[in-house]
Image (cartoon, helix red, strand yellow):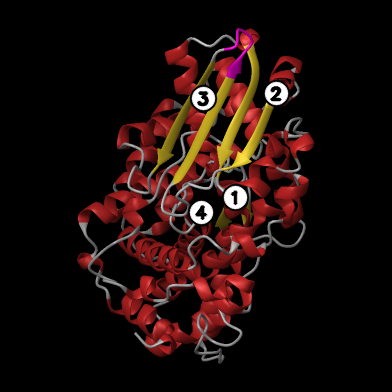
Amino acid sequence: MAQTQLSFALATFVVGTPAEAIPADVQTCVKHLILDAVGNAYASTRYEFANRALTALQGLDEGQATVIGMPARLTVRDAALMNGILIHGLDFDDTYLPGNVHLTASVVPTVLALGSRLNVSGADVLAACALGLEAGMRLAAAAKGTFIKAGFHPTGLCGAFASVLAASRLLRLDHAQTITAQGLALSSAAGTMQPTQEGAWAKRMHPGLMASAAITAASLAREDFSGPKQAYEGKYGLYSCFMGQHAGDVDIDVVTDRLGSHWECTRTSIKLYPACFQSHAAMNAALELRQEEGINVHGIESIRARVADVAVPLVCEPLDEKRKPRDSYAAQFSLPYALACCFARGSFGMQEIEESSYSDPSLLALAQKVSYEVDLDSGFPKYRSGEVIVKLKNGKEVSRRKSILPDEPAQAEAIVRKFMENTQFAMSPARLKAVADLILNIENIESAKTLSTMLGKS
């Protein structure tokens, strides 16, 4: 396909795909993604960053749009921003591994806020979410995970386009307007990886910012506000601007290959650990070693992890800081701390990102024993791998290598169980079940306002 046709092809896909043409397994997958996103949002409401963000946005203006799990109503765009912060806030949201992106954190806030505002059906919300996710994932996969090597957050960049395509679908833009909306989204695409270097909160807001900006871009396009036609392959488009010296690595054909007949979004992995996905394979290896080798932490001399080079700035460096995380967010992006938890506690859950855990002297002492090296055979971005080598004080050395493939999503039961655990503090069992049932049957909801109302907190 000629490179100048990307915006055209994606507009054709989003505008021209009937809801009934979206396969049943794709619809089921997207419903699970929405459920997981909502559960993650509820879990975030207990943390300081959520309350500070809500206070800031309430200070701007009031509105009628729902904030998930919090007693507030904001404008449509501010609700999209806030809900994006909540969904991505604990880094517990799903990941599309081939593109290294968390796209439901921007697409779900977009379709919830805009869908309720437009009073569309649940089936419309589901279709828009599926189409936006599919397009965004393909755009991310074409970059082969290298946005991050240039210092940019792939979730922010690709979330802008996934969200604007979902918004375009809900606003019923025509083909030309949907092309324009993508061009306008290019001017909003943003997000650098600097927050992960400092343990700052800013990364949490990237998906929500893209959701809010996407609603703006699609609304402007509806009124024929002009935008560039080559949002992706142009001289200053997505790939040339945000991939730096790696721009030549992009595989444009990935975006349109079997578009509409083969669906990538079913390959999305839902996290079962509230930590950066770059750590998960090594964590799996550590947990397996602990169980099968009967490792006692008091007998550990040293722990060495082998990781992909792309993981180093995220979860390994600066090493001294990673060995002693200063807050919960830093703990989520620390491989040394994660491995310490896996060996000492046999788990890494919500408790492990509480202050009582990341300040635990015994865990920090074990984290000091963790080092890393770049794995030249990591397999990134096709899959995530991690190897853990433990040297014991008795001279014995044991190791384990694990891989996480894109085609290994969590089972439905595990997804629902995670949702129940994330939300049990916030609502009664009866309401919790009602929310889950509503999302898992979203195609039968006559008005998106029904779901929006249920997700709020009065």
Task: Locate residue 7 relative to residue 124 in the image: left or right.
Answer: right
Q: Secondary structure at mark 1?
A: helix
Residue 369 circle label: 2
Q: CA distance from mark 1 to mark 2?
A: 20 Å
Q: CA distance from mark 2 to mark 3?
A: 14 Å
Q: CA distance from mark 4 to mark 2?
A: 31 Å
Residue 170 in the image: state x and y as whole percent. Answer: 41, 71
Residue at horizontal 50 percent and vertical 32 percent from the top: 422
Magenta: main secondary structure:
loop
- The residue stretch that appears in magenta: 391-395
Of pointers 4 and 2, the one earlier in the residue sequence? 4
Q: CA distance from mark 4 to mark 1?
A: 20 Å
Q: Quadrant of the N terminus?
A: bottom left
Q: Secondary structure at mark 2?
A: loop
Residue under circle 1? Answer: 309
Viewer-nearest residue: 370 or 94: 370
Evaluate whether residue 301 shows in this view: yes
Q: Does the residue at mark 2 contact the one at mark 3 (Cβ under 8 Å)?
A: no
Residue 286 circle label: 3
Of pointers 1 and 2, the one earlier in the residue sequence? 1
Residue 351 in the image: state x and y as whole percent. Answer: 61, 24
Q: Amino acid at mark 2?
A: Lys
Q: Is residue 139 above or below residue 365?
A: below
Residue at horizontal 37 percent and vertical 86 percent from the top: 175
